[in-house]
Image (tube, grey):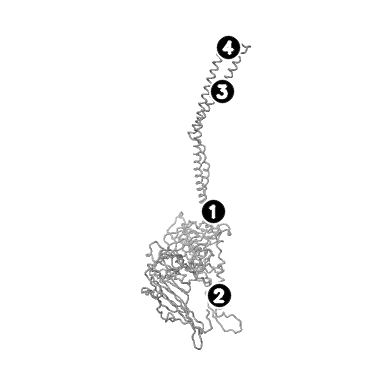
């Protein structure tokens, strides 16, 4: 049996050639260079592939003297040890300072030189004083001896020579007296010296005590500072520990519990073997690694090598658009910066690779489904007493059955996708922290596949970009209120609708694998298939910075980001500048619906004159150099126009007082109650410094009669008819004699009547002027009746 030579490569050690990011997934290409082969069968194992890949998308190609005879893909438990891949770098440097704390009091009992000299002199004087006192004591003892000797001289029993004895007594007593006097004199002198030195010692001790107190204060202050430094150090260490814990927790959230392994069997032929005995599979369709061309006679010492490349598609990695729109009302221009937010929520790091962005949104998730064929929808009349539901003319039985089968199939696809907590995490799944990606809640409109069954979303309320009466935003951006704490809260799909989230297969025949709710793209209102295949283009010459290279093929646009970049697993998306567009002739206008809100809403209409198709995405708005907030940029094809709402402008003042009513009764035989209602809208343009007129669209309405006995006639503006020619209207905003000739030059306004009783005024209002628009209608009804709303 032929021996099998095995080699193993970890995917984190392989260089990444390229990464193509799609709206909901990514395609990765890695290289394995100079693989040394043994003659015969070789098994190359590539382990550690992220569990989010589509195993059916794995392809292996290459060049070299080998033939791929077999390839297997399997999902295996992750055998790597987390602590070995991410070792903790704990450094204990806190003991050095603690050991130095006990050395502060080493020199606390040191004496000054002067005090030490005084104390030494005192010791010597006290010794001398002891000698003097010893001399005095000796003299006193000898005197007592002499006194005893003198008493013996008068003893009759022992007669002595009195003269000689007295002389001896006198001379000896004289000596004792001199010794006693000398000792006493010396004792007094030494006593005085000791008293002086004792005073000096007391003075020096007081000075030393003051110095010690001062030193204690300095020492206490230094100790307090040291304690503060120690507390600062402890706080820094605590913050460092928190940061390490955060990093560890984030790494754990991307630590795979299972990894894909690819095992490739290569057959390296022996060039010394005759051609007739070589394996016949060299020309088989399984030849993915092509043999190198024959360069003549190969020596036996030549190594057999090959270069392999493995490509695969993974979810949890994607890109989304982000914009920065800067508007100028003074020059009527705008500048739009188009950025790409790159997200990698897999377990792999793609280092120093070529990054390409693609707008491809093609998904081949139903290759096994046949194209439906419409069955004739035959209907007939049922009897009045049949008691059957009358929805047969609305939905056919075949439509209900096909929709039910389609939804069941999609739900089955979602059920087959493992939740992220089972794919990632270190330790038990219950304690694993699931990272929520901020950018995952960004608006995904241009990247969303059209869903056949999707709940309608609530319209977005724009945040006011001005100070007055800003409408409250229910969410961040997107449709409906923000859920899950996203940064731009787009409406989160409920569990039963998760299978409508878009998936991408950049190459034909790649089945789509749906993401779980942690890193899947949020669903917004459907944009249709035309908006899914959004393309973007920005001329290179129009940019002043290094930008991506653009290429458009069919319905797909790609951007090659400059240089080589690295994408590591992270819960935060990185931003890359893609293009920059300039807009001219930006039209700023106002819309006033005073009946509901007496304010003027500012909006800007921009025409995309470039070749670039703008994708729907979040945008930061700046007006005249001031950042106003974030909104949503709609999708806009090249050559089309789009409108951005900028909120309420308080410089346009709107007054909408209560209606004026005039009642009367008419008719000779059939009496009618007639009422005339007059509404007035007064608009003032306080932007006198701008010097340019503003364009306003003013909306109001008159009631529509649904009864032939109820008659509604529009009186003012006069001459209006449904679909007719607009009529000029409007008077200066000032009343009475205060109107001047300058007030008459307020601008111009035309009124028109639309369907549904809507009255529309197109107003051009000069700076610093005001205008009054009147609406009057008459309502006639039979006497005794009253009007109610339908």
Q: Secondary structure at mark 4?
A: helix
Q: Secondary structure at mark 1?
A: helix
| N-terminal label among 2 and 3 | 3
Point out residue 338 in the picture as x, y percentages from the top left corner. Answer: 43, 65
Instruction: Give the Cα separation between the discs numbered 3 and 1.
Output: 89 Å
**Residue denoted by label 3:** 137
Tell me the quadrant of the picture where the N terminus can be found: bottom right
Q: Examine the rendered structure and indicate whether residue 609 appears above or below residue 776.
A: above
Point out residue 594 in the picture as x, y percentages from the top left corner. Answer: 46, 73
Point out residue 227 in the picture as x, y percentages from the top left corner. Answer: 52, 47
- Determine crowd level at label 2: few under 14, some 14-19, many 20+ residues with C-alpha closer than 10 A: few
- Determine crowd level at label 1: few under 14, some 14-19, many 20+ residues with C-alpha closer than 10 A: few
Q: Examine the rendered structure and indicate whether residue 754 appears above or below residue 354.
A: below
Closest to the observer: 449 or 81? 449
Closest to the observer: 226 or 744? 744
Which marked residue is nearer to the observer: mark 4 or mark 2? 4
Instruction: Give the Cα separation between the discs numbered 2 and 3.
Output: 136 Å
Is the residue under label 1 in contact with that under label 3 (CB below 8 Å)? no
Is the residue under label 4 in contact with that under label 1 (CB below 8 Å)? no
Total labels: the figure holds: 4
Q: Which mark is residue 402?
A: 2
Which marked residue is nearer to the observer: mark 2 or mark 3? 3
Residue at the image point whose x is 57% and y is 19% from the top: 143
- Determine crowd level at label 3: few under 14, some 14-19, many 20+ residues with C-alpha closer than 10 A: some
Which marked residue is nearer to the observer: mark 1 or mark 4? 4
**Residue denoted by label 1:** 83
| N-terminal label among 1 and 2 | 1
Is the residue under label 2 in contact with that under label 4 (CB below 8 Å)? no
Which marked residue is nearer to the observer: mark 3 or mark 1? 3
Q: Which mark is residue 162?
A: 4
């Amino acid at each position: 049996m032929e021996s099998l030579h095995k080699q193993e490569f970890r995917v984190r050690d392989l260089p990444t050639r390229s990464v193509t990011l799609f709206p909901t997934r990514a395609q990765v290409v890695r290289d394995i260079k100079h693989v040394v082969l043994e003659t015969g069968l070789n098994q190359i194992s590539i382990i550690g592939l992220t569990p989010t890949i589509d195993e059916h998308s794995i392809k292996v190609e290459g060049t070299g003297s080998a033939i791929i005879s077999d390839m297997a893909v399997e999902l295996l438990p992750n055998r790597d040890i987390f602590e070995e891949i991410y070792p903790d770098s704990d450094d204990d440097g806190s003991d050095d300072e603690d050991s130095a704390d006990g050395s502060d009091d080493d020199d606390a009992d040191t004496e000054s030189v002067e005090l030490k000299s005084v104390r030494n002199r005192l010791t010597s004087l006290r010794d001398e004083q002891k000698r003097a006192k010893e001399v005095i004591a000796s003299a006193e003892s000898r005197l007592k001896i002499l006194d005893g000797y003198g008493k013996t001289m008068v003893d009759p029993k022992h007669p002595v020579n009195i003269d000689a004895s007295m002389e001896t007594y006198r001379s000896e007593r004289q000596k004792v007296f001199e010794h006693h006097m000398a000792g006493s004199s010396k004792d007094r002198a030494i006593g005085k010296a000791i008293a002086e030195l004792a005073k000096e010692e007391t003075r020096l001790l007081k000075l030393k005590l003051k110095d010690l107190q001062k030193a204690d204060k300095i020492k206490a202050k230094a100790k307090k500072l040291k304690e503060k430094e120690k507390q600062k150090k402890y706080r820094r260490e605590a913050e460092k520990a928190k940061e390490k814990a955060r990093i560890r927790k984030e790494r754990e959230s991307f630590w795979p519990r299972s990894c894909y392994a690819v095992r490739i069997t290569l057959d390296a032929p022996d060039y010394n073997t005759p051609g007739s005995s070589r394996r016949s599979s060299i020309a088989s369709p399984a030849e993915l690694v092509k043999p190198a061309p024959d360069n003549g006679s190969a020596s036996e010492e030549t190594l057999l090598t090959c270069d392999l490349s493995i490509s695969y598609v993974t979810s949890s990695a994607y890109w989304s658009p982000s914009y920065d729109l800067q508007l100028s009302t003074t020059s009527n221009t705008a500048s739009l910066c188009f950025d790409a937010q790159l997200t990698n929520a897999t377990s792999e790091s793609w280092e120093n690779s070529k990054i390409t962005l693609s707008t491809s949104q093609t998904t081949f998730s139903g290759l096994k489904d046949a194209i439906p064929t419409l069955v004739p929808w035959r209907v007939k009349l049922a009897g009045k007493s049949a008691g059957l539901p009358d929805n047969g003319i609305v939905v056919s039985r075949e439509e209900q059955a096909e929709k039910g089968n389609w939804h069941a199939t999609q739900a089955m696809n979602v059920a087959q996708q493992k939740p992220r907590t089972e794919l990632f995490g270190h330790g038990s799944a219950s304690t694993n922290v699931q990272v929520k990606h901020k950018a995952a809640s960004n608006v995904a409109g241009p990247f969303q596949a059209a869903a056949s069954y999707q709940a309608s979303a609530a319209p977005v309320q724009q945040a006011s970009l001005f100070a007055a009466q800003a409408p409250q935003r229910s969410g961040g951006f997107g449709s409906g209120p923000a859920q899950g704490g996203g940064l731009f809260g787009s409406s989160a799909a409920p569990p039963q609708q998760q299978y409508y989230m878009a998936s991408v297969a950049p190459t034909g025949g790649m089945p789509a694998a749906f993401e779980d709710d942690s890193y899947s793209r949020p669903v917004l209102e459907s944009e249709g298939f035309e908006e899914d295949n959004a393309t973007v283009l920005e001329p290179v010459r129009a940019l002043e910075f290094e930008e991506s290279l653009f290429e458009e093929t069919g319905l797909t646009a790609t951007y090659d980001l400059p240089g080589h970049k690295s994408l590591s697993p992270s819960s935060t998306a990185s931003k890359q500048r893609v293009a920059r567009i300039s807009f001219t002739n930006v039209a700023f206008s106002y819309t006033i619906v005073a009946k509901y809100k007496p304010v003027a809403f500012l909006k800007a209409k921009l025409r995309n004159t470039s070749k670039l198709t703008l994708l729907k995405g979040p945008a930061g708005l700046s007006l005249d150099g001031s950042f106003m907030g974030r909104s949503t940029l709609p999708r806009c094809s090249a050559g089309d126009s789009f409108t951005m709402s900028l909120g309420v402008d308080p410089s346009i003042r709107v007054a909408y007082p209560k209606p004026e009513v005039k009642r009367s009764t008419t008719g000779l035989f059939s009496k009618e109650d007639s009422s005339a209602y007059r509404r007035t809208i007064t608009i003032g343009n306080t932007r006198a410094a701008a010097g340019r007129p503003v364009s306003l669209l003013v909306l109001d309405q008159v009631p529509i009669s649904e009864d032939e006995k109820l008659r509604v006639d529009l009186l003012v503006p006069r001459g209006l008819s449904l679909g007719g020619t607009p009529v000029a209207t409007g008077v200066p905003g000032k009343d009475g004699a205060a109107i001047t000739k300058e007030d008459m030059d307020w601008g111009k306004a035309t009124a028109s009547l639309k369907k549904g009783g809507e009255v529309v005024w197109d107003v051009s209002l000069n700076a610093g002027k005001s205008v009054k628009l009147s609406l009057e209608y008459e309502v006639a009804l039979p006497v005794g009746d009253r009007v109610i709303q339908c």
